[in-house]
């Protein structure tokens, strides 16, 4: 250990990055030299999944105390996976007590963003200014989503499930890959809005997020004009767990009929009854805007 301790701090921190955060923190008891080295780690991950309730409380207290004192000039990755998070109330986030409506965090270097909230919150924590965002996962069930959606417009790959339709006028100019969860009543209208607002979309994937219940696409109401992406850039269309209800059939036919640069269209169904198989055959022989489109179904 003495030989290792004589190595430069930068190298020791590099070694610690290969350890889980919990083990990296535990090295602080080795000697005074190691006491604060872990606080220079650029990546932190805390997970209380296998902890007892008392251990969870201690972990949360530790996070509240240590995060404000962290010494790394840049935090490249911060992951907090905390169960029963309504018990986790650090003083820095007690906004209402100070008459503050919300907390805004600016992240100009952020590349990957996952945001999942299933509650109606009166006070918010908004992460904004993400010009370098590559990938985002959004799963929310509260109505005030305008600021959230505006903050991710630079994203290239988006996985999304919304309870309500976001406002018009927001453009995803760099979005190339869209995965849209189809479990909500607004899915049909949300799809139209996203197609209109994503002029460079290349891949469209309709699916169902884990633990989400599919309620079926409401009758398909096509837009008055064909979205630009369908006339210029959309190449791949994939649909998981196709159920064959009339609204789904109409949407599938619309995609095949209007996506003029489509290369592949894949529809997967977990049903095997005769009417649905007949519908899939109907789709296979329906008219297509792209003469090179390959239609596949499982």
Image (tube, rainbow, N blue to C red):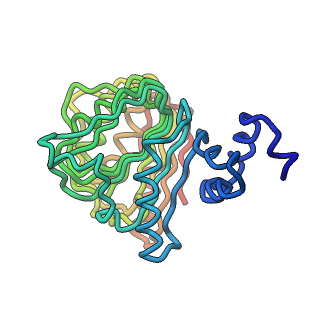
Image quadrant assignment for residue 231: top left
Residue 126: x and y, percent? 29, 38
- Say left or right for 129 vs 238: left
Residue 252 appears anywhere in the view: no
- Say left or right for 71 vs 142: right
Image quadrant assignment for residue 229: top left
Residue 249: x and y, percent? 34, 53
Residue at the limit of the structure toward the front, as seen here: 32
Q: How many marks?
A: 0
Query: At 58% from the left edge and 43% from the top edge, which residue is drawn?
Result: 39
- Say left or right for 151 vs 142: right
Residue 118: x and y, percent? 27, 58
Of residue 143 and residue 255, the one placed in the foreground of this image is 143
Query: At 21% from the left edge and 40% from the top edge, which residue is drawn?
Result: 102
Q: Quadrant of the C terminus?
A: bottom right
Picture layout, residue 184 above or below residue 188: below
Query: At 66% from the left edge and 58% from the top edge, which residue is drawn?
Result: 29
Residue 36: x and y, percent? 61, 45
Residue 151 appears anywhere in the view: yes
Of residue 23 and residue 214, the one placed in the foreground of this image is 23
Picture layout, residue 115 above or below residue 263: below
Of residue 269 and residue 278, the one placed in the foreground of this image is 269
- Say left or right for 117 vs 277: left
Query: At 33% from the left edge and 60% from the top edge, which residue is drawn?
Result: 88
């Amino acid at each position: 250990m003495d030989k290792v301790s004589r190595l430069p701090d930068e190298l020791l921190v590099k070694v610690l990055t290969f350890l889980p955060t919990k083990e990296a923190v535990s090295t602080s008891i080795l000697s005074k030299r190691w006491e604060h080295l872990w606080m220079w780690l650029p990546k932190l991950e805390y997970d209380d999944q296998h902890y007892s309730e008392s251990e969870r409380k201690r972990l949360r207290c530790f996070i509240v105390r240590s995060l404000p004192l962290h010494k790394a000039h840049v935090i490249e990755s911060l992951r907090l996976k905390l169960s029963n998070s309504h018990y986790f109330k650090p003083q820095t986030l007690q906004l209402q007590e100070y008459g503050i409506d919300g907390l805004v965090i600016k992240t100009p270097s952020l590349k990957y963003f996952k945001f999942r909230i299933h509650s109606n919150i009166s006070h918010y924590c908004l992460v904004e200014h993400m010009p370098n965002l590559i990938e985002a996962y959004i799963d929310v069930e509260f109505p005030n989503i305008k600021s959230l959606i505006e903050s991710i417009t630079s994203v290239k790959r988006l996985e999304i499930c919304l309870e309500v339709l976001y406002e018009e006028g927001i453009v995803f100019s760099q979005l190339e890959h869209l995965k849209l969860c189809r479990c909500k009543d607004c899915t049909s209208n949300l799809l139209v809005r996203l197609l209109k607002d994503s002029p460079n979309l290349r891949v469209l994937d309709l699916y169902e997020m884990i633990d989400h219940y599919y309620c079926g696409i409401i009758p398909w109401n096509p837009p008055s004009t064909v979205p630009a992406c369908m006339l210029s850039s959309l190449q791949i269309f994939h649909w998981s767990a196709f159920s064959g209800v009339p609204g789904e059939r109409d949407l599938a036919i619309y995609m095949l009929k209007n996506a003029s640069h489509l290369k592949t269209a894949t529809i997967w169904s977990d049903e095997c009854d005769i009417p649905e198989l007949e519908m899939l055959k109907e789709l296979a022989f329906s008219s297509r805007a792209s003469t090179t489109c390959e239609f596949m179904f499982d």
